[in-house]
Image: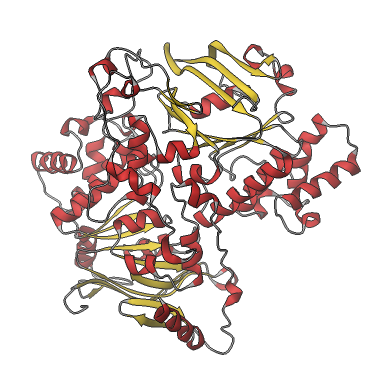
């Protein structure tokens, strides 16, 4: 951990939105280090703030949102103080790039694919027209698009969903960014295409030496891509650890519940474990542990005081009073043991 | 085995096409399957494979261009009498994919839920209607007070419950669920899946469950049909299909399921299905029962290969 260098460091971030005269506290004191070369997955339900957090790192916060306090440290600069588009232009695209969720809507239907990939090169590089085209064709080949010369001149509607997502990735990596943020890049795709795109992102990560931040609610995808996992709930990171720590030895009851509700762990004919209730209303102040009202293992203290991080290992920490030495010892649900003993289905890939 | 189970729905050589002349597109090309009473029949395939089209053709939303759909012993596709049409509406209901898009934003929950009912059962008094709506809402775990609210006041999971209540109020015997959970959050999915299985047990419902996610299918379906480009390529009881999938397309789909285990996931090899592995130029593929209740689309050469493989398992 001492040899790991944080490329991006989010410190005690508080983000609020003003909506119809009310204040919504979307991010409630998040601190997170993103290390060089790793793939970090941020998992959470919709509304947990995972997109807000990463969008803020790119200056894409909506107009009614504001950073109340906190810092985003990137190469000695505090991105949280950036106000104008001019300042962000130096970061967006060339330093930090993003792949959006829906490949059907994130491309411009009126411009050719080549033009769209070239766009960021025009802003961020000194290449001339010829060199830019050469570079675009090179990237198109990298992301696995065949006949790049011909595809260069085509429009988005001539591409399938998976192909468009490849183009979106090409646009993101065109300027050799240091950090690539993928916001649910495969949710809109079929499982077979999803697997291909995940593989592509992993290859691009190696080839371009990228640090990847992956936002998703699909824990299967997380297991596939992530070195480290951060679990978000109600605007806070409640547990963070290496991928194996989160899947094999989760500590927070919310992580337990999230894993246990996976249909992959369901036994036919038996009820699937589910999380009751709804996430807290972030317009109102949250007292104690935000998950307490839905938590079957909640202690009295959970309703009164917000838990701090308890360290489980140097890489693993969780915000739950269950880890306090005074707390009763509670075993995680039995079904979670299935995860460790899971085998590839179908015998297709046995051995 | 088969004679013990009562067939509820029979689909025989179903064809559905859109457009005509040059722009004719065959979405479903000759599909055969039976659905037994009380079971959950899963239909899996990628987008564009025709799985939704089959569901919609059964419920008469799309006209069929060939073949037969037989429900409770009566042919229900093509031209049918008014009474039978009413009967079909009563007995077959649908749950849609996106609860954000499938509810009318300007209608109250009570109006959404009772719309089908008042159109089919004319002459129900206000009070009776109210009672039926309240009951349907209670059945799906919502409070009757919600009836006077509007859809935007509800979360995704609750909206999907409203969609289910709208289907249940007709007291159907057969429900087509078209990707009912893919638009929902992970934590909500489990709730909706549990609700669907609870309702099935209480009311002896039969489901046609359409999805692209095989991990969900494994949990909910009794039998699964895998569809590819408008043709069913493999059909088997769930555990058989997962234990020894034979068709290369099924294998590719299975290999792509994301598993929540980092060691497995990071070492997995995804199989890519390539249609050219089949040589159907002279030896035409047929629908073959390769072992008990396990059907596959294969030609003679492939069938013998599959049989060999089954022996070694």
- On the rendered image, what quadrant is the N terminus of chain B found in? bottom left
Percent position (x, y) of residue A335? Answer: 30, 45
Q: Quadrant of residue B56?
A: bottom left
Residue B24: image x %, image y %?
A: 54, 70
Between residues B216 and A107, which one lies in front from this camera angle?
B216
Residue nearest the observer in this picture, B263 or A22: B263
Compared with A30, B212 (above or below) is below
Is any part of residue B123 visible from this angle? yes
Residue at image location 38% in from the left, 67% down from the top: B243
Considering the image in quadrants, where does the C terminus of chain B appear? bottom left
Q: From the viewer's side, name the closer residue of A106 and A49.
A: A49
Could one spot residue A109 in this view of the protein? no
Q: Is residue B189 left or right of residue B245?
A: left
- The residue under the point 18% across, 73% down is B6
Q: Is residue B9 above or below residue A336?
A: below
Task: Please count the marks in the image.
Answer: 0
What residue lies at 39% left-to-right and 22% top-to-bottom?
A: A319
């Amino acid at each position: 951990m001492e040899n790991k260098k944080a490329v991006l460091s989010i410190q005690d971030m508080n983000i609020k939105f003003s909506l119809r005269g009310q204040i919504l506290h979307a991010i409630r004191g998040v601190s997170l280090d993103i290390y060089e070369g790793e793939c970090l997955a941020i998992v959470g339900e919709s509304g947990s703030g995972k997109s807000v957090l990463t969008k803020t790192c790119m200056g894409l916060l909506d107009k009614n949102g504001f950073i109340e306090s906190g810092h985003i440290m990137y190469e000695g600069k505090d991105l949280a103080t950036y106000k104008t588009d001019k300042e962000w232009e130096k970061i967006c695209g060339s330093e930090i790039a993003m792949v959006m969720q829906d490949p059907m809507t994130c491309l411009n239907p009126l411009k050719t694919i080549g033009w769209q990939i070239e766009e960021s090169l025009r802003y961020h590089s000194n290449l001339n027209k010829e060199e830019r085209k050469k570079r675009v064709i090179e990237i198109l080949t990298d992301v696995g698009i065949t006949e790049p010369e011909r595809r260069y001149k085509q429009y988005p509607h001539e591409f399938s969903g998976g192909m468009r997502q490849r183009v979106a990735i090409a646009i993101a990596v065109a300027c050799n960014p240091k950090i690539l943020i993928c916001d649910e890049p495969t949710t809109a795709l079929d499982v077979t295409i999803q697997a291909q795109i995940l593989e592509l992102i992993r290859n691009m990560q190696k080839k371009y030496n990228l640090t990847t931040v992956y936002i998703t609610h699909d824990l299967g995808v997380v297991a596939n891509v992530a070195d480290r996992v951060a679990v978000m709930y109600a605007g806070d990171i409640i547990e963070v650890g290496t991928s194996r720590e989160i899947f094999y030895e989760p500590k927070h009851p919310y992580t337990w519940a999230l894993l246990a509700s996976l249909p992959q762990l369901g036994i036919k004919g038996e009820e699937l474990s589910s999380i009751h209730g709804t996430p807290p209303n972030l317009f109102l102040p949250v007292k104690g542990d935000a998950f307490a009202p839905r938590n079957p293992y909640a202690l009295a203290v959970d309703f009164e005081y917000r838990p701090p991080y308890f360290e489980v290992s140097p890489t693993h920490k969780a915000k739950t009073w269950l880890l306090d030495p005074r707390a009763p010892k509670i075993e995680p649900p039995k079904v979670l043991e299935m995860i460790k003993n899971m085998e590839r289905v179908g015998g297709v890939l046995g051995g | 085995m088969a004679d013990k189970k009562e067939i509820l729905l029979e689909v025989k050589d179903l064809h559905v096409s859109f457009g005509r002349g040059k722009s004719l597109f065959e979405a479903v090309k000759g599909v055969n399957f039976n659905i037994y009473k009380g079971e959950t029949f899963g239909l899996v395939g990628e987008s564009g494979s025709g799985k939704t089209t089959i569901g919609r053709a059964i419920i008469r939303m799309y006209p069929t261009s060939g073949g037969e759909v037989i429900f409770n012993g009566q042919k229900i596709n093509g031209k049918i009498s008014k009474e039978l049409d009413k009967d079909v509406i009563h007995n077959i209901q649908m749950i849609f994919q996106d609860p954000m898009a499938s509810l009318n934003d300007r209608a109250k929950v009570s109006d959404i839920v009772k719309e089908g009912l008042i159109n089919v059962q004319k002459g129900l008094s206000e009070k009776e209607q109210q009672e039926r709506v309240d009951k349907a809402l209670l059945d799906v775990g919502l409070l009757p007070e919600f009836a006077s609210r509007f859809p935007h006041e509800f979360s995704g999971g609750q909206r999907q419950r409203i969609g289910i209540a709208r289907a249940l109020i007709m007291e159907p015997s057969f429900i087509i669920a078209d990707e009912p959970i893919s638009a929902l959050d992970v934590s909500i999915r489990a709730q909706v899946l549990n609700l669907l299985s609870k309702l099935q047990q209480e009311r002896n419902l039969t489901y046609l469950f359409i999805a692209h996610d095989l991990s969900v299918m494994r949990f909910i379906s009794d039998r699964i049909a895998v569809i590819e480009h408008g043709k069913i390529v493999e059909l088997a009881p769930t555990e058989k299909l997962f234990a020894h999938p034979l068709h290369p397309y099924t294998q590719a789909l299975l290999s792509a399921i994301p598993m929540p285990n980092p060691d497995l996931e990071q070492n997995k090899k995804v199989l890519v299905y390539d249609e050219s592995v089949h040589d159907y130029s002279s030896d035409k593929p047929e629908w073959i029962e390769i072992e008990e209740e396990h059907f596959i689309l294969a030609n003679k050469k492939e069938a013998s290969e599959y049989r060999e493989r089954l022996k070694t398992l």
